[in-house]
Amino acid sequence: MNVRENFEPQEWFNVMNGPSRAGLAVILASPSGLTGVLAEATAITQEIRALIASHPTTPLLAAMADAYEHTTPEELRAQRDAAGPQATPRDPKAARDEALQAVRQVMWLVTTKATPEDREAYGALLVRVAERVAGAAKEGGFLGFGGVQVSDAEREAIEEIRRLTATPGGTETPPGPVGGP
């Protein structure tokens, strides 16, 4: 059985978007201006390309790599539509919190519907994306001078993602909805 078949279409869409959500949480923790945001967004794509090039051995990551390579724009739109409408908060902190909630939800899905090896590999992928995004642009500088490579707020976001991807104590109750309490 294909691991993708363990997930409903909207769940698979969320699994596929987990790396982007982890990266977004870091971007929103400490926005770095237009060029910094572009570099950080590019880092998400680069880590996904690295996943595909690595020929992953866990069934979940292999299915993700295959989907990233072979999903057509029409299929992507259908998956996004199946996931339902997504309200986007205008406040960066609220959007960051929503991205972290999405990471929490997707980790619950992967924990309950995939193997422990898949769960571990997927969690490691989310942490790698977060770390790569944080290191993609300096924070707090001016015209490329000064600043730090990884801000305290980005470190906090990475630590929260590490916490969310750690082995949970129990998985009977799913996390609340994105944007919920």
Image: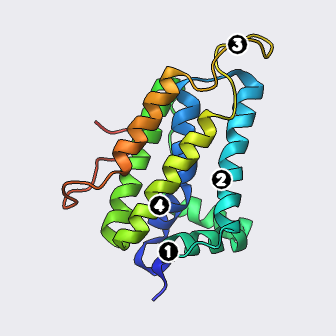
Residue 40 drawn above or below residue 76: above
Q: Please name the residue shown 55% across and 29% down the image.
A: 28
Cα separation, mark 1 vs mark 4, equals 9 Å
Kind of residue at badge 1:
Thr
Residue position marked by numbered label 1 in the rendering: 58
* Crowd tier of the residue under label 3, counting other residues whose Cα lies within 10 Å: few below 14, some 14–19, many 20 or above: few
| Residue 78 vertical placement versus 150 (above, below) | below
Question: Closer to the N terminus: mark 1 or mark 2?
Answer: 2
Pointers 1 and 3 in contact (C-beta within 8 Å): no
Residue 31 placement (x, y as % from top left): 61, 23
Q: Amino acid at mark 3?
A: Gly
Q: CA distance from mark 3 to mark 2?
A: 25 Å
- Residue 85 in the image: x percent, y percent? 51, 50
Q: CA distance from mark 4 to mark 3?
A: 33 Å
SS at mark 3? loop
Query: Which of the two labelled residues, at mark 1 and mark 3, occupies the earlier sequence position?
Result: 1
Q: Residue at x 47, y 40 (%)?
A: 99
Q: Nearer the viewer, residue 160 or 85?
A: 160
Q: Quick one: label 4 or label 3, which is nearer the N terminus?
A: 4
Which residue bears the numbered disc 4? Answer: 122
Residue highlighted by disc 2: 47
- Mark 1 touching mark 4, by CB under 8 A? yes
Give the quarter of the image for residue 76: bottom right
Query: Which residue in the structure is indicated by mark 3?
Result: 141
Front residue of 177 and 152:
152
Within-10-Å neighbours for mark 4: few <14, some 14–19, many 20+: many
Alpha-carbon distance for marks 2 and 4? Answer: 13 Å
Measure the C-alpha gap from mark 1 to mark 2: 17 Å
* Amino acid type assigned to the residue bearing label 4 in the image: Tyr
